[in-house]
Amino acid sequence: MLEKVRYEGAYPTRERAEEAVRLVLAGLGRQLTGDERVDLAACLPLEAARILSAQIPTLQPLTGWAFVKDLATQAGASLATTRWDTGSVLTTVAALAGPDLLTRILQQLPTGYALLFGQAQLTPAL
């Protein structure tokens, strides 16, 4: 997983990719609950699953954009860098999760996460 994130994110070092993975998975762990959280952890490599599972879910889930802003604040990084990190990690997570689990995860999360996972953000016509 780490090498895929490093490749997708064009990170210069393995350590930089690992920082992005830790930040984003910890943030995602605070957003997910229930079966989706457990099923996703089962799809991830052991260390990544531990990072995700060690987090206490928040009572007030963040929208996708608020999620990126929260991670940027925690990392002390720019919004652009954090958005890049988030997309690099979550597109890899999406590939590991598969389409069925990803659909369930996106249904649980507030709006704005689909693009972070590399998916189209579809909204019903009015």
Image (tube, helix red, strand yellow):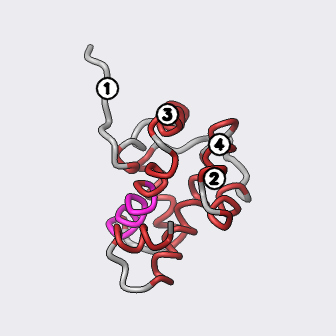
Badge nearest the viewer, 3 or 2? 3
Q: CA distance from mark 4 to mark 1?
A: 26 Å
Image quadrant where one finds the C terminus: top left
Label 2 residue SS: helix
Badge nearest the viewer, 1 or 3? 3
Q: Which residue is mark 1?
A: 123
For the residue pair 93 and 30, the one nearer the viewer reads as 93
Q: Which mark is residue 39?
A: 4
The image shows residue 63 at horizontal and vertical percentages of: 47, 43
Q: Is residue 96 magenta?
A: no
Q: Is residue 59 left or right of residue 22?
A: right
Determine the main secondary structure of the stretch shown in magenta. helix
Q: Which residues are magenta?
A: 80-90
Q: Is residue 87 magenta?
A: yes
For the residue pair 50 and 32, the one nearer the viewer reads as 50
Badge nearest the viewer, 2 or 4? 4
Q: Residues within 10 Å of mark 2 (few under 14, many from 20)?
A: many
